[in-house]
Image (spheres, rainbow, N blue to C red):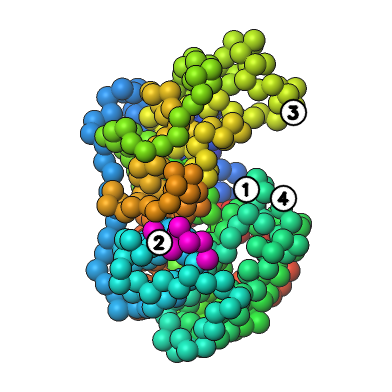
Amino acid sequence: MDRLTAGEAAQALSVSIDTVRRWDKLGLLHCTRDSRGRRLFDVAEIERVKRQHEHEGDRGKPRFRVLVSEPSGLTSLELFAGAGGTALGLENAGFSHILLNEFDHDACETLRANRKEWNVLEQDIHEVDFTPLAGSVDLLQGGVPCQAFSYAGKSKGFGDTRGTLFFEFARAIEEVRPRAIMMENVRGLLTHDKGRTIQTMLNKLLSLGYRCAIKVLRAQFLDVAQKRERLVILGIRNDLSAPILYPTQCGEILTLWNAIGDVDEGEGSSYPQRKKEILDLVPPGGYWRDLPEELQREYLKGSYHLSGGKTGMARRLSWDEPSLTLTCAPAQKQTERCHPEKTRPLNVREYARIQSFPDDWCFVGSTASKYKQIGNAVPVNMAYHIGRGIVSMLSGVAADGFTEVPALTKAQIEDTGYLKRIALEYT
């Protein structure tokens, strides 16, 4: 596979280097990095994106799908299960869930409504005794609540009660002793508290007897029509010789059209009349800077004079790109997620499609609760790809589409620069 720098690729394909960089920024191109840290691009992939942009408007039929494989016979324990994005993805990858623990009532009702056979425990994790499950769990997965480490939150980390939930995740590992572990979180965890938070986590997992690796995965390269990054920690118990495998991020990128082009109107939020009048003027893919200056000032109010791009404000999505990362509220002013054609927020079913939930997956609760459940979920297809790698790790059966990542040493964990660099290497 030929890999070129942005400049070389631009010259070979007769497009500007700014165009190549813009496509990369929009999440339309997959890249790798060389030893000097330069981004390298696949020529065939750039040619595909170029053809796509030359034929905008000729999109064909939407191509939404949820990936499913045969059962593997492997078992899993799911912590902080939410509305089931990771759980469903892992089930589709072949895992059978022994227990799913979640504290939010609406999310638990969503899990029960869709999978009556799942053992859903609606309880504070601090009160759960996991020792009865010792020896029966192949994979322990925990989507530890990420607000304590996210840029959008207060970034208090272990100073926030949600941050201390990691230690409950670690307690569950100690009590259950699963063969493999998986933990996902926001990319911001890499730099939180100057890297000390992720070091604390990895050192704890190391002390529990697990070899671990880390990688930032990008959903748009894993059959999800969304630009969403998640930091994924995978670990194998020390007495096992299995490799640590991550899905290789490549292949055709799904656009918003692929995911929701055939979705009709449905349950969702709406805009006040004046806001709708202003957003009517924003083109697909545009945002507040595409408005006349007087409307920019009216819409942004005090934020108009603040520094920063404020790119989420008055933002209309584009059919020909993956969606921006979904938030818990699509009509929120700072993180607008306006439909590409209709001047309204994305509705609940569109949200679910973009997160690769199947159409028969229902959500329980108020409209606001449904948005929150979906926005907090890991995309189903993303979890599927990670899960298929873990199946290969634990079964010893080789599978295509995965890259072996070396386990981190104690010295590497203590080097925050190395952690960040290795996590951000695209495979």
Give me the residue at 35% from left, 42% from top: 349
**Magenta residues, start to end:** 103-110
Find residue 307 and name its label. 3
Asked whether disc 2 touches disc 1, contact meaning CB atoms under 8 Å apart, the reply is: no
Q: Is residue 356 above or below residue 60?
A: below
Residue closest to the eye, 165 or 402:
165
- The verdict on residue 371 being magenta is no
Left or right of 62? Residue 391 is right
User: Badge 1 is on which residue?
Assistant: 37
Instruction: Please name the amino acid that badge 2 sits on.
Output: Glu
Dot 2: element: helix
Residue 40, visible in the rendered structure? no
Dot 3: element: loop
User: Badge 4 is on which residue?
Assistant: 154
Gap in angstroms between the C-alphas marked 3 and 4:
19 Å
- The quarter holding residue 116 reads bottom left
Dot 1: element: loop
Badge 1 crowding class, 10 Å Cα cut-off, few under 14, some 14 to 19, many 20 or more, is few
Gap in angstroms between the C-alphas marked 3 and 1:
29 Å
